[in-house]
Image (cartoon, rainbow, N blue to C red):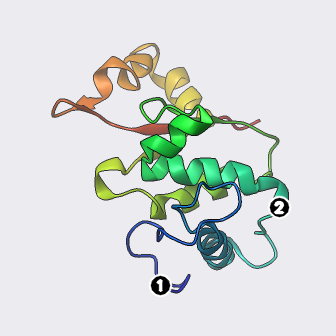
Amino acid sequence: MRSPSDPSGPPPLGGGASGSGGDLDFNWCLEFFEKRGKEEFGDHFFKIVPEDHDLIFNLTIYFLGDKAQCEKLGLDVTKGILLSGPMGAGKTSLISLMKYVPPPERNFVMKTTREVSFEFIREGYEVIDRYSRMSFRDQHPRIYWRLRVM
């Protein structure tokens, strides 16, 4: 098994955690996200708390594109994510760590709601088209994850 310092490829499978259904080594994922989060955001600013484990598990299987596991949890891998919470809760940090999860065909671009709203103020309604029907590239949609920043 890879060590949490190894960011290459998606999280390892096998040795499932409680609630995981058995395929994803969720304990490895938590250790990896904790280590990488502290490296990227600082020891004093980043900590994964047990209350967030379900959310992190759901995001991990979503970003892996695990259709069977997502179906069990009622998640649709063809739809986007709206992650909301108070400022400073770690939404942006958590989604930033998810860049290590998906295989190349599921890579994503992150845009905060604040960024999209500023674009709308500057450019008007064509911004709505940019992030909806005009977001297709080579017959495939460009994937944006929307974060609601309060």
Q: Which residue is mark 2?
A: 50
Q: Residue at x 65, y 71 (%)?
A: 27
Count of marks overlaid on the render: 2
Left or right for 137, reference 37: left
In the rendered structure, which amino acid carries the disc numbered 2? Answer: Pro
The C terminus, quarter of image: top right
Mark 2 crowdedness (10 Å alpha carbons): few <14, some 14-19, many ≥20: few
**How far apart in space, not on screen, are marks 2 and 1 (Cα)?**
23 Å
Q: Position of residue 28 (x, y in %)?
A: 60, 75
Q: Is residue 47 above or below residue 22?
A: below
Is residue 115 in view from this perspective?
no
Q: Position of residue 140 (x, y in %)?
A: 23, 33
Q: Is residue 56 above or below residue 37?
A: above
Q: Position of residue 13 (x, y in %)?
A: 47, 68
Mark 1 crowdedness (10 Å alpha carbons): few <14, some 14-19, many ≥20: few
In the picture, residue 26 is in which quadrant?
Answer: bottom right
Is residue 70 in view from this perspective?
yes
Q: Is residue 87 above or below residue 121?
A: below
N-term-proximal mark, 2 vs 1? 1
Q: Residue at x 47, y 84 (%)?
A: 2
In the rendered structure, which amino acid carries the disc numbered 1? Answer: Arg
Q: Which residue is mark 1?
A: 2
Q: Residue at x 71, y 38 (%)?
A: 149
Q: Is residue 100 above or below residue 69?
A: below
As helix, strand or loop, the secondary structure at mark 2 comes to helix
